[in-house]
Amino acid sequence: MHTNMKLMDIVNEDLQKAISAKEESVKLLALNTLKKFLQGSGDRPDAGINRTLESERNDIEALIRSSQTIAEIYMVQHRNDLAKMEMQKISIYEHYLPPKLNKKELETAVEAIVEKTGAQKRSYKDLHKVMKVAMEELKGKAYDKNITSMVQQVMIYH
């Protein structure tokens, strides 16, 4: 990603490049949606002001979750063409986020949190303690559902 540029500037620049290059409509649609989402609406408290990188990342992650839900609905309805389009949009949105931990890195991080907290594996009481710390420490480094799944796997099934 570009350094020393605001995320909105990067999205605008990429959108202009996509328009100039006559990119496929999915990319244009995704970039336009992302731009509008980052700009926000008048009813949001942070609309029209300098936003933090964290709030922008949270917005992108919300947009990804929304697209994942839509894709799942399309798959249930046997509309694989539309589900594929949503998945393509997700990969475009993810480009604007820092890379996420892979499964092994996430497992190592959760194992370290278990050790740091002194939690006992196979303890549902300690599971909640580890979950709380993991969510705080790994926010933005992995998707919440992946963190939850890994904490459960490490705490209950290992």
Image: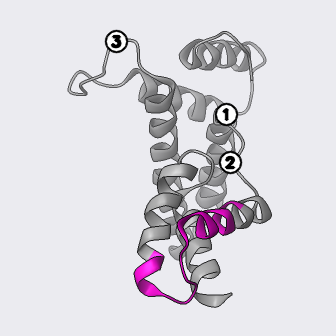
Residue bearing mark 2: 88
Q: For numbered disc 2, what is the local secondary structure?
A: helix
Is residue 60 visible to the viewer in this orientation of the structure? Answer: yes
Q: For numbered disc 1, what is the local secondary structure?
A: helix
N-terminal label among 3 and 2: 3
Marks 1/2: CA–CA distance: 8 Å
In the image, what residue type sits under mark 1?
Lys
Residue at the location (47% across, 51% down)? 136
Q: Quadrant of residue 96?
A: top right
Residue at the location (52% across, 75% down)? 76
Question: How would you rate the neighbour count of disc 2 (Cα within 10 Å): few for under 14, some for 14-19, many for 20 or more?
Answer: some
Question: How would you rate the neighbour count of disc 1 (Cα within 10 Å): few for under 14, some for 14-19, many for 20 or more?
Answer: many
Q: In this view of the protein, which residue sits in the foreground, 38 or 130?
A: 130
In the image, what residue type sits under mark 3?
Ile
Drawn side of residue 59 relative to residue 72, left or right: left
Whether 77 is drawn above or below 3: the answer is below
In the image, what residue type sits under mark 2?
Gln
Q: Which residues are magenta?
A: 109-127
Asked whether residue 124 is drawn in magenta, I would say yes
Q: Nearer the viewer, mark 3 or mark 2?
A: 3
The reply to whether the C-beta atoms of the residues labelled 3 and 1 are less than 8 Å apart is no
Marks 3/1: CA–CA distance: 27 Å
The reply to whether the C-beta atoms of the residues labelled 3 and 2 are less than 8 Å apart is no
Residue bearing mark 1: 27
N-terminal label among 1 and 2: 1
Q: Quadrant of residue 107?
A: bottom right
**Can you give x and y, in whole percent of width and height, for residue 103 in the image?**
75, 64
Residue bearing mark 3: 49
- Quadrant, the C terminus: bottom right
The reply to whether the C-beta atoms of the residues labelled 1 and 2 are less than 8 Å apart is yes
Asked whether residue 93 is drawn in magenta, I would say no
